[in-house]
Structure formats: C-alpha cells, structure tokens
Amino acid sequence: MADPMRDEELTLRDGRRVRLRPGGTADAESTLRNVNRVGEEEVYIMIEEVPNLEEERRWLSAFDGVRNVLFVAVADGDVIGAADCHAGAFRKDRHVGGVGISIQDGWREVGLGRRMMERVLEWMRVRGFAKAELAVFATNHRARRLYESLGFVEEGVRRRHVRIRGEFVDEILMGLWLGSEPAAAAP
C-alpha cells in the first residue's frame, strides 16, 4: 500500500491537473483564502470566515499526520480544496476521526471531492481508526450523495440546527465504519 502522506498529481474528470499532498503551516495564506472563499458562499461549511492569518496558522499547527491530518489540493500554486481529520480527544472516542472538506467553486463535480475523501479514509485506515464521522447540511445534496457513495450512513439529525440565509436547516450526522461494525453494548 502506498503511503497516504504521499504527494500525488491527479487528473480530474475535466482534464485539469491538481497536486494532492499533506498541508501544513507553510500553506496558511493559501488555505486561508480557500476556507474564506468557501465560507462566504454560506451553504457548504459551518465557518464563514477565518479572520486572520494567525488564526489559520494556529489551526494548521494541530495537524501532526499521526492523530490529525490535512490534505490540500493545489492548482497553479494555490490551495483550491482541503480535507482533514481530527481524532477524538478522549480515550473513549480516540478510535473515531471527524472529517471535514471544503472545495472552491469551479472545482466541484470533477471528482476532486471523492479523491480527497478517499485519501483521508486511506490515512485513517493506515493509522488504525475504526470509524469516520462527519456532519453535512441537509441542503447539501451533492455532498450527501458523495458520502453515501463512499459508504457513510446517516446516524442522526440535528433538527433545524443551522441557520442559512435566514432559513433553519437540519444538520445530518453520518458515520462510516472502516472495518467490521462492532456489536452495540448491552444497555
């Protein structure tokens, strides 16, 4: 199996090429632009804006490649997509990794999201995680289809949890067992 921390050039369905690689603090200016561009659209990710470079560097410094990872997609020297995983913070949930992804407009629907999610899940399997989890706005049908195609299943709904452009929207909680799903403990 290839090292999931590899640097790889990908050809997308529309023929454009991007580099998929681990991200870090040296990417701060570019990842800040990426998250703020996606955030200002309001409908895809929870955050609307990272206010400054210092905040972005602080966030990036948490990615050690062992328990937390960030992969970035780079085109023409600029980050146009990011996917990350954060391990559970407590002994009871360290086997679970929370996954997030943000891809700029103009780079969606060409296979980049799938490739980035596959890389994060590959990294999680190599690192021994048992489960991936994520949350997605109920109105983000494209992302939900992608997650379901990767094997994620709905595990819960936080009713009217977010307010997007004045409308209350459900947040769908999804999970994926990276191996066999264990039996639930008896009550």
Image (cartoon, helix red, strand yellow):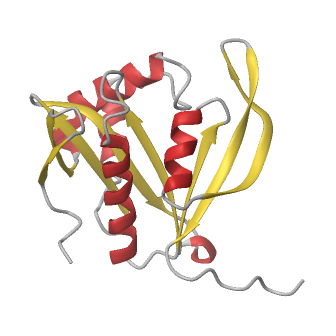
Q: Position of residue 89 (x, y in %)?
A: 54, 65
Q: Is residue 20 left or right of residue 184?
A: left
Q: Position of residue 75 (x, y in %)?
A: 15, 32
Q: Position of residue 32 (x, y in %)?
A: 31, 28
Residue sitting nearer the eye, 116 or 27: 116
Q: Position of residue 44 (x, y in %)?
A: 52, 29
Q: Is residue 183 left or right of residue 53?
A: right
| Quadrant where the image shows the N terminus | bottom left
Quarter residue 118 falls in:
bottom left
Disc tally is 0
Compared to residue 165, the image places residue 47 above or below, namely below
Q: Residue at x 25, y 44 (%)?
A: 72
Q: Residue at x 31, y 35 (%)?
A: 110
Most distant residue in the right direction = 187
Residue sitting nearer the eye, 12 or 32: 12
Quarter residue 172 falls in:
top right
Q: Residue at x 16, y 40 (%)?
A: 26
Residue sitting nearer the eye, 4 or 1: 1
Compared to residue 180, the image places residue 50 above or below, namely above
Q: Residue at x 51, y 54 (%)?
A: 149
Residue sitting nearer the eye, 141 or 135: 141
Compared to residue 48, the image places residue 17 above or below, namely below
